[in-house]
Amino acid sequence: MPVSGREVSLAVQKMLAATTSRSCGYGTAPTASSTPTGATIPYNVLYPLGVTTSGPPLGDGDADARALVQITSVASTAEQVEWMADRTRSAFLTRSKGTFTNTVSVAGCAVIDRELDKEEGISVSSGVYSYIQRYVLTVTTLGS
C-alpha cells in the first residue's frame, strides 16, 4: 500500500501544533477555532509539496516515500517570525540519543528520517513577515 501524502501532512500539522504551542494551518492560515492558538500570530502554514514513492526490490514498489512539505511561519515582526522558524526547526530536527524527540505519527507507517531541504529566510509583504522552510520526511509502511 502506498504512503498517503495527506496522512503524512496531517501528522506533521499535529506535531507542529503540539510542539511549537502555536496553530498550524493546512494550505491556509489557521482559523479562529484552530488549536492551540487560533488565528493569532505567530503561526505556521503547512503546504504539501508532493510524495515520491519507491520500494525494495521484490517487494511493494510503493512501500517507501519521500514527502516534501513547506512550512511557512507567519508573524508581525522579523524577530517574531524568526523565533517561530527556530521553534519549527527544533520541532522537526531535535534528537535525543539519535532518535527524533518529536514523533510524527502516521497510521500504518514509520517516519524513519527527516531533513531540512531548504530555507528561504525572512520576507515581508504589507507588514506581514514570513519565513519559509522545506523539510523532507522519509516514510516507510509497516508490515501487516
Image (spheres, helix red, strand yellow):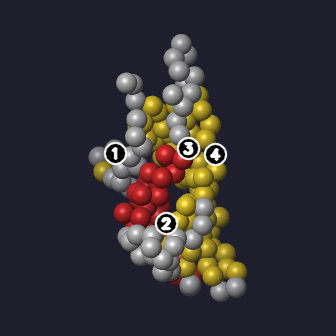
Q: Position of residue 127 (x, y in %)?
A: 65, 86
* First reached walking from the N terminus: tag 2 or tag 1: 2
**Marks 3/4: CA–CA distance:** 7 Å
**Marks 4/2: CA–CA distance:** 18 Å
Answer yes or no: do the residues labelled 2 and 3 have beta carbons within 8 Å? no
**Marks 1/3: CA–CA distance:** 23 Å
The residue shown at (55%, 79%) is 75
In the structure shown, which secondary structural element does the residue marked by tag 2 occupy? strand
Residue 99's mark? 1
Give the residue at mark 2. Answer: 24
Disc 4 marks a residue whose amino acid type is Gly
* First reached walking from the N terminus: tag 3 or tag 4: 3
**Marks 4/1: CA–CA distance:** 25 Å
* Label 4 Cα crowd, 10 Å radius (few <14 / some 14-19 / many 20+): some
**Marks 2/1: CA–CA distance:** 24 Å
* First reached walking from the N terminus: tag 2 or tag 3: 3
Q: Position of residue 29 (x, y in %)?
A: 57, 71
Residue 50's mark? 4
**Marks 2/3: CA–CA distance:** 17 Å
* First reached walking from the N terminus: tag 4 or tag 1: 4
